[in-house]
Image (cartoon, rainbow, N blue to C red):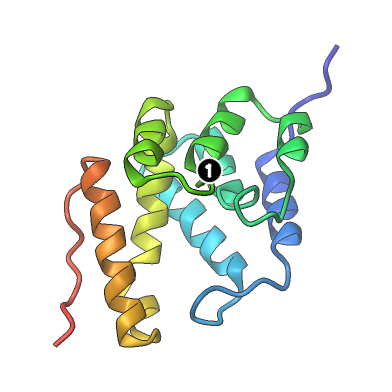
Amino acid sequence: MPPPYLTLAEVESIAREAHRGQRDKAGRPYVEHLAAVAEGVRARGGSDEQIAAAWLHDAVEDDALSRRWLEEAALPERVKDMVLAVTKRDGEDLRAYTGRILATPGAALIKEADLAHNADPARLAVLEPAVRTRLTAKYAQVRGLLGLPAANLPQDG
């Protein structure tokens, strides 16, 4: 009989430990981003599986956890599928990336919460103007490809 799945608290703990010491582009502890995305998924009505995937959404992409770890983890396949769907691949174009997200049940909500936090004006405000402009355009493009409404972000003057 297979072992029981990891609890949501265990997934959160694993994600926090895996990303310990990492910083985001603004110099903040990276776990703050993970917590915000997980909370964003919860606030949008996401399931526990989607919240678990939110905690792990950057783990493989950032090499915080290996793909092998994910494959062998005591997680439902749906969680693993969502994590891999939102994991960017080297050289992958945005249409292929967003197409995979849309084709994976539950993954679009995770990416929506991720984009919402990434595009938070308070987070963007601390970045250099050129970086802020580039990222704002990138996030808007991904939102469009996912069929999400445009975020209401202040424009650079």
Residue 6 position (above or below residue 39): above
Q: Residues within 10 Å of mark 1 (few under 14, many from 20)?
A: many
Q: Is residue 6 visible?
A: yes
The percent position of residue 12, horizontal first and vertical second, equals 67, 51
Which of the 4 image quadrants contains residue 131? bottom left
| Residue type at tag 1 | Ile
Q: Is residue 55 left or right of residue 16?
A: left
Which residue is depicted at the point 65% across and 47% down? 60
Residue 78, placed above or below residue 12: above
> How far across and down, in percent of the image, does residue 22 sit?
67, 71
Q: Nearer the viewer, residue 70 or 138?
A: 138
Residue occupying image coordinates x 54% and y 73%:
24
Residue 133, horizontal then vertical, whole percent: 27, 76
Q: Quadrant of the C terminus?
A: bottom left
- The picture quadrant where one finds residue 44 is top left
State whether residue 74 appears in this view. Answer: no
Tally of numbered discs: 1
Which residue shows up at 63% across the image and 57% down it? 62
Quadrant into which the N terminus falls: top right
Reading the image, the residue beneath label 1 is 51
Q: Circle 1 sits in a helix, a strand or a loop, which is it?
A: helix
Whole-percent x, y for residue 3 in the image: 83, 23
Identify the residue at the far front of this view: 91
Q: Is residue 2 above or below residue 47?
A: above
User: Along the line of sight, which residue is nearer the eye, 144 or 18?
Assistant: 144
Question: Residue shown at 74%/51% (left/top)?
Answer: 14
Taking the image as shown, residue 106 lies to the left or right of residue 53, namely: left
81 or 109: nearer the viewer: 81
